[in-house]
């Protein structure tokens, strides 16, 4: 193709032939025509759209970045897509699998592939031969079908993005094969299990696309940032007096990439500014003030803490998430974490709450796991006296069942107040999601179940434009789902995963019941409600004491929904940029299978490359082995202690070995958390009823109980991210949008994509230059903005001595406490692990 012709294949009400003819001849729309042809939310008869304000906001977001024209003749599934997509899929899947073993999670964003594929795509378009070939005598094929297009670029992103996230099954496989020493677990069974868990969601995604992709109200806001990035690269639209989106993107990317060096290396204090800790020395209760203000893992709840680190802020997508959804979510976080948790903790509501983490062996002079001498922000398990206990101690690793003698000696098991409220909100969210979606979206979902799609979406321009392409038949997805069910039964029952055949069907049923209500919440808000806790809860009741079965069921059911929604999100991206559905189906399937294969064998290779050795520390349940895998005893400062895998295994021990009947039973201090189901079922009906009573009120319909209760703040992470995302969201989506709408429409989503890309580049550079060699660390010198405890909540002696250790172990050296007169003199435990 030597040029591109814009073809309008559909419009909302008011389309006129003369406009289409003029566009076909290379003309353009007048300002009045652009306004007239923009999508309007005037579907007053649709019960799903009783909220005109919300729909107007959705269409404003779409208008800002999503094109409303299309040329179906543009080649999409080209050699460039296969070559570049495969390259970045292999690279990202391998690298991100490696990083799953890091002490602190690190993830290379697929936006890196978008950035690098842009010049490579143009280079291939310039250098490859343009000659056409015919396959089997009728299929035309060319290495270079024309200019590198936005559609190809988007499909490369989908290819790379699908492969970039390591398979969730890895945690299951590593846990069984290595951490629980099930060495007889065959690699091909592991690979098959991984493929099944990732592909199960495909069938569900395809069958749900009429409910979660086609409707305009299903916004999928995270896609807008991706489209803005692609637009900024391909649309060099320099207007008089304005910088182009393309230049703005690269300038913002460069600035953020440079800035990211400061919070991640030069001035880490920018990542966590604890306001309350600054006033702790002069407060009436310094310890309470520190516990409330500390945001660090093992510390407190981060009350009023701030972060200036975009890599932390961006986790909440404050620019692309609708402001109403962001406020719902953070209102719930503030309510639970800043009000309910400290009140319950201070009053020992779950029995001995304030004792958690008080064992001196884990304090500032011990392992320093809890540097404040107490803990709220921790997912660890504890004895009733507050001493930490490893979850693996409750598992008989020979039979993968509960060590009942050990459990009976130490029951009931305790967790932090923070962690207990996480479980409570998980129960609230599960019930609230089903009730909320039934009340607000039930009629529309039923209509889509009983009515032809073209009749429901005839007024939506994007659905109209997609009619130019052949859709994927439902039977494709049904066949894929059927094959996965058969293979899943075989591998789960006879492949070493201890899950009976009916468990596969139950996992599928749980995912099927959940995917539409949870997908609806994610589609309109950008936030996904996790199914992992509920899946563990269900199978833990049915198969108590069987850790392998519980972990396998959790992986299968959770990933069926999670991966399905991830694929639905990509289908919506294809819907926005007009990628043929069959090309999308092919790329998603190939990328998934390729990525899982790389994930599994890379993870196994990494684990075994660290080797195993005889050691004095032998798992008492596996003494006959005479060895321990080195990764399981790795020193956290070295950066490779496989923390994510340990957390997954601990959860399996709680729900699988101990089981929910014991953990939340009548003898447990956490039985009251089960009231979350009742709370979740009742609260949505209250605000729905108020909306029906007062239909003109513009606030009741914006109250979203699942978002308020979703509580995505997992215990054990930095909690300095509770104010800054809201500030950013208000600044961009309220002030700038209301007072400089033209700028917001032109640059807001481009800025979000640029900041994400720049932050990813900055983090990657910092890691590769200063941290990748665990035996030769290069720390930045300690000064006021780079203290051992960046939020300055820990005691001063702790700051000083830990800094001595960090600098003493730098550049391949080894710190020796006996040579440190100050720290040795105060009795600091310098030989303990940080």
Image (cartoon, rainbow, N blue to C red):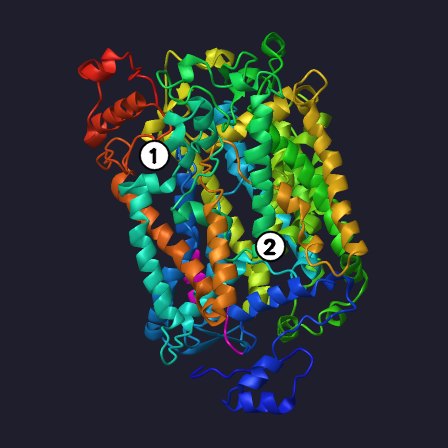
Q: In the picture provided, is 210 more to the left or to the right than 221?
A: right
Residue 60 on the magenta segment: no
Quadrant into which the N terminus falls:
bottom left
The x, y position of residue 644, in whole percent, is 47, 33
Front-most of 681 and 726? 726
495 left or right, relative to 452: left
Which disc, if any, is residue 790?
Answer: 1
In the picture, measured across the screen, residue 356 lies left or right of residue 87, that is right
User: From what the image shows, is residue 587 above or below residue 673?
Assistant: below
Q: Which residues are magenta?
A: 73-86
Compare residues 401 and 779 and report the one nearer the observer.
Answer: 779
Q: Which mark is residue 336?
A: none
Element under disc 1: loop
Q: CA distance from mark 2 to mark 1?
A: 32 Å
Q: Position of residue 490 (x, y in %)?
A: 66, 37
Q: Secondary structure at mark 2?
A: helix
Q: Position of residue 348 (x, y in %)?
A: 59, 19
Q: Badge 2, how many Cα within 10 Å: few under 14, some, many 20+?
A: some
**Percent coordinates x, y for residue 561 in the rendering:** 64, 46
Q: Quadrant of the C terminus?
A: top left
Q: Which residue sits at x=23%, y=11%? A: 825
Please give the label number shown on residue 324: 2
């Amino acid at each position: 193709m030597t040029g591109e012709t814009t073809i309008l294949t559909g419009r909302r009400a008011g389309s006129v032939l003369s406009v289409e003819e003029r566009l076909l001849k290379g003309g353009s729309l007048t300002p009045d025509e652009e306004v007239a042809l923009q999508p309007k939310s005037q579907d007053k008869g649709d019960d799903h759209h009783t909220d005109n304000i919300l729909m107007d906001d959705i269409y404003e977001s779409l208008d800002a970045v999503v094109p409303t024209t299309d040329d179906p003749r543009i080649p999409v599934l080209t050699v460039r897509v296969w070559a570049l997509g495969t390259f970045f899929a292999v690279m990202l899947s391998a690298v991100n699998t490696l990083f799953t073993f890091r002490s602190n999670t690190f993830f290379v964003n697929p936006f890196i592939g978008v950035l690098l594929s842009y010049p490579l795509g143009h280079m291939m378009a310039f250098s490859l031969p343009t000659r056409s070939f015919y396959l089997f005598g009728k299929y035309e094929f060319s290495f270079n079908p024309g200019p590198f297009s936005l559609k190809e670029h988007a499909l490369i992103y989908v290819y790379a993005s699908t492969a970039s996230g390591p398979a969730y099954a890895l945690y299951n496989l590593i846990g069984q094969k290595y951490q629980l020493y099930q060495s007889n677990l065959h690699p091909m069974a592991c690979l098959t299990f991984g493929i099944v868990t990732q592909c199960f969601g495909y069938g569900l995604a395809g069958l749900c696309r009429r409910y979660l992709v086609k409707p305009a109200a299903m916004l999928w806001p995270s896609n807008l940032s991706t489209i803005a990035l692609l637009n900024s690269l391909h649309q060099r639209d320099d207007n008089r007096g304005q910088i182009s989106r393309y230049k703005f993107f690269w300038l913002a990317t460069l600035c953020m990439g440079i800035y990211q060096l400061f919070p991640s290396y030069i001035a880490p204090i920018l990542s966590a500014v604890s306001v309350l800790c600054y006033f702790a020395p002069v407060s009436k209760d310094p310890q309470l003030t520190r516990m409330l203000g500390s945001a660090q893992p093992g510390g407190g709840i981060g009350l009023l803490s701030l972060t200036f680190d975009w890599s932390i802020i961006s986790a909440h997508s404050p620019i692309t998430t609708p402001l109403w959804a962001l406020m719902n979510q953070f209102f719930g976080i503030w309510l639970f974490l800043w009000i309910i948790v400290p009140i319950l903790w201070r009053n020992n509501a779950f029995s001995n709450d304030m004792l958690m983490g008080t064992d001196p062996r884990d304090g500032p002079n011990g392992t320093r796991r809890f540097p404040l001498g107490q803990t709220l922000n921790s997912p660890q398990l504890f004895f009733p006296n507050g001493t930490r206990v490893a979850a693996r101690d409750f598992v008989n690793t020979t039979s993968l069942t509960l060590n009942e003698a050990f459990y009976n000696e130490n029951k009931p098991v305790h967790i932090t107040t923070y962690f207990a409220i996480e479980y409570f909100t998980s129960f609230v969210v599960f019930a609230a999601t089903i009730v909320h979606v039934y009340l607000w979206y039930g009629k529309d979902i039923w209509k889509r179940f009983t009515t032809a799609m073209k009749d429901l979406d005839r007024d939506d321009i994007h659905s109209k434009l997609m009619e130019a392409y052949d859709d994927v038949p439902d039977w494709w997805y049904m066949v894929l789902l059927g094959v996965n069910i058969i293979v899943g039964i075989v591998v789960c029952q006879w492949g070493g995963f201890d899950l009976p055949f009916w468990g596969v069907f139950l996992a599928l049923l749980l995912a099927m019941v959940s995917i539409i209500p949870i997908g609806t919440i994610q589609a309109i808000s950008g936030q996904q409600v996790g199914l992992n806790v509920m899946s563990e809860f269900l199978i833990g009741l049915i198969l108590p004491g069987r850790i392998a079965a519980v972990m396998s069921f959790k992986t299968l059911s959770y990933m069926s929904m999670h991966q399905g929604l991830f694929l639905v999100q990509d289908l919506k991206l294809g819907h926005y940029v007009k990628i043929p559905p069959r090309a999308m189906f092919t790329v998603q399937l190939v990328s998934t299978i390729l990525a899982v294969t790389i994930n599994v064998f890379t993870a196994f290779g990494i684990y075994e490359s660290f080797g195993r050795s005889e050691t004095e520390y032998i798992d008492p349940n596996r003494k006959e082995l005479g060895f321990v895998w080195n990764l399981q005893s790795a020193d956290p400062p070295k950066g490779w202690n496989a923390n994510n895998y340990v957390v997954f295994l601990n959860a399996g021990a709680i729900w699988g070995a101990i089981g929910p009947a014991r953990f939340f039973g009548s003898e447990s201090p956490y039985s009251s958390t089960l009231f979350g189901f009742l709370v979740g079922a009742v609260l949505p009906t209250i605000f729905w009823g108020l909306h029906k009573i007062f239909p003109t009120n513009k606030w009741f319909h914006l109250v979203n109980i699942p978002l308020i209760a979703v509580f995505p703040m997992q215990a054990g992470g930095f909690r300095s991210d509770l104010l800054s995302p809201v500030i950013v969201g208000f600044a961009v989506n309220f002030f700038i949008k209301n007072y400089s709408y033209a700028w917001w429409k032109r640059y807001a989503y481009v800025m979000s994509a640029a900041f994400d890309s720049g932050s990813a580049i900055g983090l990657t550079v910092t890691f590769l230059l200063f941290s990748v060699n665990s035996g030769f660390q290069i720390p930045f010198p300690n000064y006021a903005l780079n203290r051992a405890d960046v939020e300055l909540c820990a005691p001063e002696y702790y700051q000083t001595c830990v800094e001595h250790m960090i600098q003493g172990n730098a550049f391949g050296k080894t710190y020796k406490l006996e040579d440190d007169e100050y720290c040795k003199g105060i009795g600091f435990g310098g030989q303990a692990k940080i």
